[in-house]
Image (tube, rainbow, N blue to C red):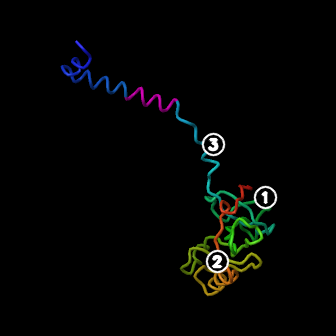
Amino acid sequence: MSLRESINENPVLGLGIALVLLAVAAAGYFLIKPDTSERDKEYEPLSYYYDQNKKELFVAPSGREVPFETDSGSYQGEPAAVRAHVFACGSCADESKRFIGWLSKPAPPGQAGGAEEWIRLPDQNKWYPSNSPEAQRIFNQVRQRCQKTHVLHCSPEKSGQINDQ
């Protein structure tokens, strides 16, 4: 009697063989599956941040909650690193065309004024709710800075930069 005839006469045998084959396939997958953990780290999204003490732009993983600590210590009683919104006139890859449009951090609890985020210019200390007239002036300054070309919002990936921190 052939295997096919045996399975036709005894369906439980067919089910058993199918389950064994499935288990072997699953075990084989987990044994030879490539380790992507290192590769996934290489493709972690990056963002620009600004150290308010050093007045320096740097790159770190996008998931960081701001503000966060840097080796420069605290800034006005808070961690020094905040999010930097970097733009370029024309090409993000050309460092000479990139500039910091504004810095941002979450609105302080109870002071949001309806805004989830506060912003400021890198060369000023005063923060404004992102929905305020002052913030709108900052946004307009960024748009007007690139009169002959389009303003591009840059990411470290677009700029060809690597993770510095």
Name the secondary structure under disc 1: loop
Q: Residue furthest top?
A: 1
Image quarter where the N terminus lies is top left
Boundaries of the magenta span:
22-31
Q: Position of residue 99 (x, y in %)?
A: 73, 73
Q: Residue furthest front?
A: 148
The residue that appears at 53% across and 31% down in the rendered structure is 32
Hey, what amino acid is under mark 2?
His
Q: Position of residue 160 (x, y in %)?
A: 70, 59
Q: Nearer the viewer, residue 159 or 82?
A: 159
Is mark 1 in CB contact (under 8 Å) with mark 3?
no
Q: Nearer the viewer, residue 113 or 35?
A: 35
Say which mark, if any, is on residue 38. Answer: 3
Say which mark, if any, is on residue 71. Answer: 1
Q: Position of residue 50 (x, y in %)?
A: 73, 67
Name the secondary structure under disc 2: loop
Hey, what amino acid is under mark 1?
Asp
Q: Nearer the viewer, residue 76 or 126?
A: 126
Is mark 1 in CB contact (under 8 Å) with mark 2?
no
The residue that appears at 71% across and 55% down in the rendered structure is 163
Secondary structure mostly taken by the magenta-highlighted segment of the chain? helix
Picture quadrant of residue 75: bottom right
State whether residue 27 is above or below residue 81.
above
Spatial CA span between label 1 and label 3: 26 Å
Read off the residue under disc 2.
150
